[in-house]
Image (tube, helix red, strand yellow):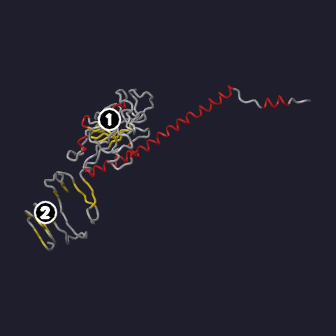
C-alpha cells in the first residue's frame, strides 16, 4: 500500500482554528482578570503603607518644630515648582497659601521641617495639602486649641479642636497642585471628598470608594491625617546647653503658673510638698544653692549651703548649716 506522505505532512501542520484561538484567549482572560485585580489591590496597599510612613515623618517633624519654636509652621507656597528657590519654605499668607476661615492652606513646608522634598507629594504626583489654624502659627497666639473639625461621610462629628490636617488628594488630585505648581482638577461641590478642598474648616474622613465618576456624591479617594497634640506639646522646649556644658536645657514657655502637687498654682512655681536642692545627686542635702530674686515662702527651710534672697524669707522655721 502506498502512503500519501505529502497529505500526512499537511495534516500534521494544521494549527488552531480562529474559534479555538478565541476560546483559549477568553479562558486566559478570565483567569488573568482576578490576577490583575489582585496586583492592583496589592499596589494600592503598598502605596498606602508608604504614605502612612510619610505621614508619620511629617507629623513628627511638625511636633519637633512646635517644641523648638513654640508654634506650628505656616504652609509652603502650593503653586511653587520643585527646583525653584525657596521651595518648601513656610509662607504665612500671600501667594500660594489660602487664608480663608482663619486657616492657612498650602503645601507641606518640607524645607522648614528639614524633610526631603519628595515627602511633599503623594504617589500620583499631587502635593499633599497642609491646613493649619492660623492662630497656632504664631508664638504669641499659640494655646494648643485648634478650630478644625473632622466629620465622617454622614456628617457626624469625629474630632474637633484639631490644629492641623494633612490631605492626600488621591489619584484625581482634586483641588490640589502638582509638584510643578500646576493646578489639578477643580474641587467641585458634589463629591464626598469635595469637602476636603473647599477652603472651610470642616474635613471628611471616610473610606475610599471604587466609583469612577469623580463628581458622584459618594466618590471619595482622599486620605486625611490629623492629630490632636498633647496638652504640654507646645509649652516645653529642649535645647542644647551653651558652651561646654553637657545635657539639655528644658524651657517652659507657659506664661502662667506651674503647679507641682497642686492643680491651682498661685505663683510662678507652686509646690505642694518638699523641695530638695542637691549638688552631688547623693540624695542627701549636703550642697547646692537657692537664689531667689523675690520671695521664698515655706513652712520649714533647711539649708546647708547658700540661700540668696533679694527680698523676703517667710518661714516659721529656718535652719542653716546643720540638719534639724
Label 2 secondary element: strand
Image quarter in which the C terminus is found = bottom left
Residue 175 pos. (x, y %): 36, 33
316 or 155, nearer to the observer = 155
Alpha-carbon span between mark 1 and mark 2: 50 Å
Badge 1: few (under 14), some or many (20 or more) residues near its Cα, within 10 Å?
A: many
158 or 30, nearer to the observer = 30
- Earlier residue among tags 1 and 2: 1
Q: Which residue is the extreme one toward the bottom?
A: 322
Q: Which residue is the extreme one toward the right?
A: 1
What residue does disc 1 label? 203
Image quarter in which the N terminus is found = top right
178 or 138, nearer to the observer = 178
Check the image and report above or below for 65 versus 94: below
Residue 211 pos. (x, y %): 44, 29
Residue 132 pos. (x, y %): 29, 41
Quarter residue 150 falls in: top left
Left or right: where does residue 154 sit relative to residue 291? right
Check the image and report above or below for 196 versus 142: above
Q: Residue at x 68, y 27 (%)?
A: 20
Q: Residue at x 82, y 30 (%)?
A: 8
What residue does disc 2 label? 292
Quarter residue 87 falls in: top left
Residue 149 pos. (x, y %): 29, 37
Badge 2: few (under 14), some or many (20 or more) residues near its Cα, within 10 Å?
A: some
Quarter residue 31 falls in: top right
Cβ–Cβ under 8 Å for marks 1 and 2 = no
Amino acid at each position: 500500500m502506498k502512503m500519501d506522505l505529502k497529505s500526512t505532512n499537511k495534516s500534521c501542520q494544521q494549527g488552531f482554528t480562529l474559534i479555538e484561538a478565541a476560546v483559549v484567549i477568553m479562558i486566559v482572560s478570565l483567569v488573568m482578570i482576578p490576577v490583575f485585580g489582585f496586583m492592583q489591590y496589592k499596589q494600592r496597599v503598598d502605596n498606602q503603607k508608604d504614605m502612612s510612613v510619610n505621614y508619620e515623618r511629617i507629623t513628627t517633624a511638625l511636633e519637633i518644630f512646635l517644641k523648638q519654636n513654640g508654634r506650628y509652621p505656616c504652609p509652603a507656597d502650593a503653586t511653587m515648582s520643585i527646583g525653584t528657590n525657596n521651595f518648601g519654605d513656610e509662607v504665612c499668607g500671600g501667594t500660594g497659601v489660602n487664608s480663608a476661615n482663619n486657616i492657612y492652606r498650602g503645601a507641606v513646608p518640607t524645607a522648614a521641617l528639614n524633610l526631603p522634598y519628595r515627602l511633599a507629594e503623594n504617589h500620583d504626583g499631587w502635593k499633599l495639602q497642609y491646613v493649619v489654624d492660623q492662630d497656632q502659627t504664631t508664638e504669641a497666639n499659640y494655646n494648643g486649641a485648634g478650630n478644625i473639625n473632622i466629620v465622617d461621610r454622614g456628617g457626624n462629628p469625629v474630632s474637633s479642636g484639631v490644629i492641623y490636617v494633612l490631605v492626600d488628594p488621591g489619584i484625581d488630585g482634586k483641588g490640589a497642585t502638582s509638584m510643578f505648581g500646576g493646578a489639578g482638577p477643580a474641587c467641585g461641590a458634589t463629591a464626598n471628598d469635595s469637602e476636603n478642598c473647599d477652603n472651610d474648616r470642616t474635613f471628611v474622613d471616610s473610606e475610599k470608594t471604587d466609583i469612577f465618576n469623580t463628581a458622584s456624591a459618594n466618590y471619595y479617594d482622599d486620605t486625611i491625617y490629623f492629630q490632636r497634640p498633647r496638652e504640654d506639646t507646645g509649652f516645653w522646649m529642649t535645647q542644647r546647653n551653651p558652651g561646654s556644658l553637657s545635657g539639655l536645657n528644658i524651657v517652659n514657655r507657659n506664661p502662667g503658673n506651674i503647679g507641682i502637687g497642686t492643680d491651682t498654682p498661685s505663683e510662678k512655681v507652686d509646690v505642694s510638698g518638699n523641695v530638695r536642692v542637691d549638688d552631688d545627686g547623693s540624695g542627701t542635702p549636703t550642697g547646692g544653692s537657692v537664689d531667689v530674686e523675690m520671695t521664698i515662702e515655706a513652712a520649714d527651710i533647711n539649708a546647708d549651703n547658700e540661700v540668696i534672697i533679694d527680698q523676703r524669707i517667710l518661714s516659721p522655721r529656718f535652719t542653716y548649716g546643720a540638719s534639724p
